Structure formats: structure tokens, C-alpha cells
Amino acid sequence: MPIDFSMDTAEKRPQGYLVSRRTALALLAAACAVVVLTAVITHNLSNCGKSNGDHSVLNNALQQAVQAQTKVKDVRLPRSVVPDSYQVRLVPHLWGENTNFTFSGQITIRVNVTSDTDNITLHANALTVK
């Protein structure tokens, strides 16, 4: 008995997804809305439209930054000052009455000065030294 492998063309289903016109229009409208919403959010979060062609604030900030860079001198320790040891004690204020997420502490630095110097610079950015 022979087996027939032929397929009836009436039973074939088209490949891919079928989308109605209404669904296609809804997807297109949603995509357009996302693009417009992204543009509005980006515009509001940036400084677009606020400069009015006046870039003097930016130019002044850049000039001050360049001047500050040119004024910086070598702030490293002189070669005649050699640190021997450091003792650092920090107390973080995270819990309890003083919960302001700061710290207090004490540091002791022992240095060996091998020749005369008139300056030793210690850096303390945004720290209150008592």
C-alpha cells in the first residue's frame, strides 16, 4: 500500500504573525508616544532652552577652571620628609543620637625629616581639623 506524502494547499497556514489593522495602528501609536515622551523628558531634564544663546556662565566657569589648574603647584611631600607610620582611629556616626552619617577621628603621622624644610602640606579636603 503506497503512502501519499502530498499536502493539501488548503490546509497550509501562512508563516509569521497576523496582525489586524487596528492592532498595527495601536502599536504604531504606542511607539510614537514613547518617542515623544522620551524627547519631552530629555528636554526637561537637560538645560535645553534655558541658555537663550548666553554662554557666559559656562565660559566663566571654564576660565576659572583653567586658571585654577595653572595656579596649582607641586603639593606632594618634599623628598626630605619621609612618613614612617600612620595611626588612624575613625568613629562613624551611623546609629544612635548622632545619626548624621559623618565620622570623627584622630590621626597620628610620624615622619622622618632628613633635611631642613620650610613647608609640610597635609591635605584635608572637606574636613574640619581641630
Image (cartoon, grey):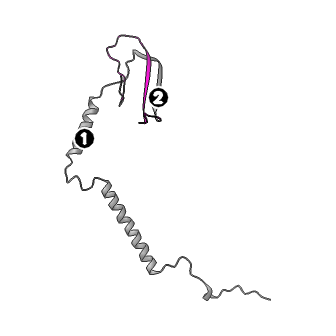
Which image quarter holds the C terminus?
top left
Number of numbered tags placed on the structure image: 2
Label 2 Cα crowd, 10 Å radius (few <14 / some 14-19 / many 20+): few
Q: Which residues are magenta?
A: 96-125
- Taking the magenta stretch, the answer to whether it contains residue 103 is yes
Identify the residue under disc 2. Answer: 91
Image: 41 above or below 59: below
Depth order, front residue of 9/26: 26
Q: Residue at x 34, y 24 (%)?
A: 75
- Residue kind at label 1, given as amino acid type: Ala
Say which mark, if any, is on residue 61.
1
Which image quarter holds the N terminus?
bottom right
Local secondary structure at mark 2:
strand
Image: 91 above or below 1: above
Local secondary structure at mark 1:
helix
- Tell me: 115 left or right of 70: right
Image: 94 above or below 8: above
Coordinates of residue 127 in the picture (x, y in percent): 36, 29
- Taking the magenta stretch, the answer to whether it contains residue 53 is no
Coordinates of residue 85 in the picture (x, y in percent): 48, 18
